[in-house]
Image: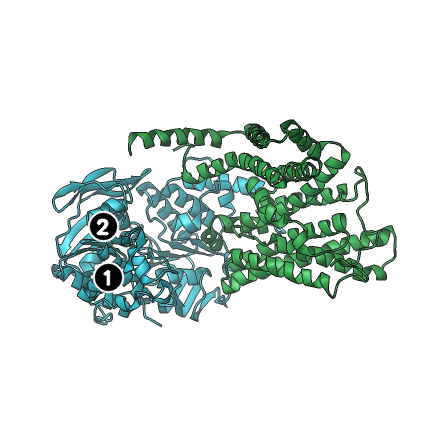
Amino acid sequence: MSGTSGRLYDALDRAADRMLRASVFERLAIATASTALALLIGVSIVAAVGYDPVQFITSLIEGALGGRSAIARTLRFSTLFILTGVAVAVAFRAGVFNIGVQGQFVVGGITTIMSIIWLAPLLPEGVVGGVALIIIGTLAGTLAGGAYGALPGALKAYADANVIITTIMLNFIATGVVGWLVQNPLRGEGNAAPNTERIPEYVSFPRIVFDSSGFSIIGLGIALATVVVIYVVMERSRFGYDMVTSGHQESAATYSGVSAKQTVVSTMALSGMVAGIAGAVFAIMIQGYYTDPSGIGTYGFDAIAVSLLAANNPLGIIPAGLLFGGLESAGSHIGIYTDVPVQLIDGVIGLVILFVAVPELFRMAAARTGLGGDR
Amino acid sequence: MEGITKRFGDVVANDSVDFSLEEGSIHALLGENGSGKTTLMSVLYGLYEKNAGTISVNGEPRTFDSPRDAMDAGIGMIHQHFQLVDSMTVLQNIILGHEPTNNGLVDTSEARADIEEICSHYDFNVDQHLDTKIQDLDLGARQRVEIVKSLYRGADILILDEPTAVLTPQEIQDLLDVMEELADAGHSLIFITHKLGEALQTADEITVLRDGEAIGTVDAGETSEEELARMMVGREIQFDRPPRDPSDGASVLEASELRVRDDRDLEQVSGVDLSVQEGEILGIAGVQGNGQTELVEALTGLRDVDSGSVGFHGDDITETNRRQRIRDGIAYIPEDRTTEGLVQDYTLVRNALLGNQTVKPFVENGMIDWSAVDAHAGDIIEEYDVQPPDKSNEAKSLSGGNQQKFIVGREIEHNPDVMIASHPTRGVDIGSIEFIHDRLLELRESGMAIVVVSSKLDEIQKLSDRIAVMYEGEFIDTVDPVETTEEELGMLMAGHNTAEGDVAGENAPSGGVQS
């Protein structure tokens, strides 16, 4: 090895060692510093292009945290990012690349809405009926999302079809089919837009703490409860151990009696179920009806970034989801109240995510390559 | 190559190995899995940096930092797993990385002519397929593409790493013919294999490696399969066979007329009958690759059988899966501790649960009791002398011997009725070997039925009550370890049944019978 590359290697080794030994507190400090640095660079670009940097940064903070309605909006986005992020993390931890969370999210959402619409006439109106319909609708959405996730899992297990490809294709199918359904057979009577009927007024989460039309603390509660349940499943249950072991080292899992085929199906089903819960919360809490899925936002895809930022750790999804929610919320606020073009806002947001992710990616790379640590 | 030494951490993969290849000859490198064959060739090919020793090509000392250096010196390597892009054509694969260009654009017409000349010179039929995609070729043809690729790049010395492992018997014969033609044309070939017959048939000289050391180089015309088999398995230390009483317990594990196919759908186990009693160790001896792996996988529930049955305490368990067989009490020390026996980046605590996922008190009602698992890991470490004694260490940080002791401990603590131990002491230091042997003998005394698969004759002779010798998927004979000499075992392992004459016939490759 030549002198220069040797020195570079040593420097990398020392840096990797430092990163691997960083405590949780240090890592949080690094993440905060990275965010600040990214914002500094972003604001410089904004100023260089000729917009008011002070206004930009004020709107950014206001949009994310400025007042009750801004916080409600941030938490609304965060709720969805946390749920879809956990859906992705479950699969990734088991070594299955579920890129189809968006499709499972859509299938879960439309199933929730339609089951509520169809069952509402059979149940009493009011709080009791509302709670019953929310529970039934959420369960239906969860099961539908799970089934739509299990499908590519079964294709992998029994026909050796690549999960990445099948899940991407199933996203298009979900969007296309649901788009057609809301245009035609499921379109609400007299609706000009391609929407289903609204679910009844009484089928909604209570407005406690935040009096916001698109956010209820119940939705966030469901998201946090899901994180806890998934964390316990992954860390404390046999199913989770089997799944994570398959992801780490499939031959060892097989040796210990785990069936690789069954595991890929059940992993995809669980991941799809969480995506289905996300779809149900989106449908009940935010929309109240279902519309053409090509226009509802790409939570299932953004979730991949959320999960990777959290190193696929269910608990890490919470701060990652809050960060993404805050940035999304700030972005929409800046878009409305300043004349900074939306492309520039997205660019700055991307910069923040990149800067937060890089130290963690560096840690992961260091652990993988054997740089740093004891040898 | 002189005095080549290569260490990975504490493990010595090559211990001052000397190796020389004559121009225009075929030199076979023979040895068991893990004996250091591939490591030695990877050092030659510039993939690994050697710790000591010198490499000379045509009398000139050389150092290779990368395969590209080796290629420039006229060395080509054909890996066991082909390095071809499946979705590209034969022509594209051959010129990949060395594309002839004309004004910056790839010009294939010249390459096409060159390749056709190489093919016609050596009678390859690859040139008919130049525009076929690799994925549409069978494995034999893919291998010829690899050879043409090396020749096209100007290789004079070709290293073939277990080239016959993936081929059918007919393809193997074709390959051996090709190798002889290449040698006649002045190329020098290194042929890595663990199959005795192929080495004898094709090579001019044969060097045997064992545990990283070159045991010796012999002239292929002056040696025999028996001598080679003995050189390969050899003996490391003199083990004393402990005195024992014959067992007369009930039969616990049985197999009858078992036929098993490998991943390539070739039959590897061809009608094996076996039975193990309480308090008995059945040794299965044989040169690696004669169906032992598939037999063990069929017994442990990791591989479906083609026909025949497996019985346990008189019940037919042929259809039960691995998890059920763990619950029934069939413990298994796997052949490969690094990929199967331990999850390398789990701590020892998490690894203590591996295989115990259905065992109380570690898991109840599907939920794991980590404190019980934690205590269990501590017990294994203490009782089986795992060093360093820290259960929060990751498995990969342990030496081979300590990894193996941990696995042995974990499997014994299942309290099984049957223990199947596949190469229980491969790559393990002497101290740990003695320790593991003592444990297995204790288990025998306590009435357990044990199957030990090993290619080490001394180990088999020390441990076994009966030795079944496996050759080409069959038990060629079952013998008494006390009354059978090492020479006789060597003969059996090479396929010569003394009692019934030569059952193996000619030097058929031991890749199994094609379906």
Q: Chain of mark 2?
A: B
**Is residue B366 shown above or below A161?**
above
Lateral position of residue B48 relative to residue A90, left or right: left
**Whether labels 1 and 2 share one chain:** yes
| Residue drawn at the location 56% of the way across and 32% of the way down | A45
Q: Nearer the viewer, residue A298 or A257?
A: A298
The residue wearing badge 1 is B115
Q: Find residue B209 and name its label.
A: 2
For this rendering, which residue is in front, B489 or A302? Answer: A302
- Of the numbered discs 1 and 2, the one sitting upstream in the chain is 1
Say what secondary structure mark 2 lies in. strand
User: For the N terminus of chain B, which image quadrant?
Assistant: top left
Tell me the element at label 1: helix
Quarter holding the C terminus of chain B?
Answer: bottom left
Callout 1, which amino acid? Ile
Residue B22 in the image: x percent, y percent?
12, 52
Q: Is residue A53 visible?
A: yes
In the image, taking residue B511 as reference, residue B365 lies left or right, namely right
Question: Which chain corresponds to the colour cyan?
Answer: B
Q: Quadrant of residue B153?
A: bottom left
Up/down of B76 relative to B196, above or below: above
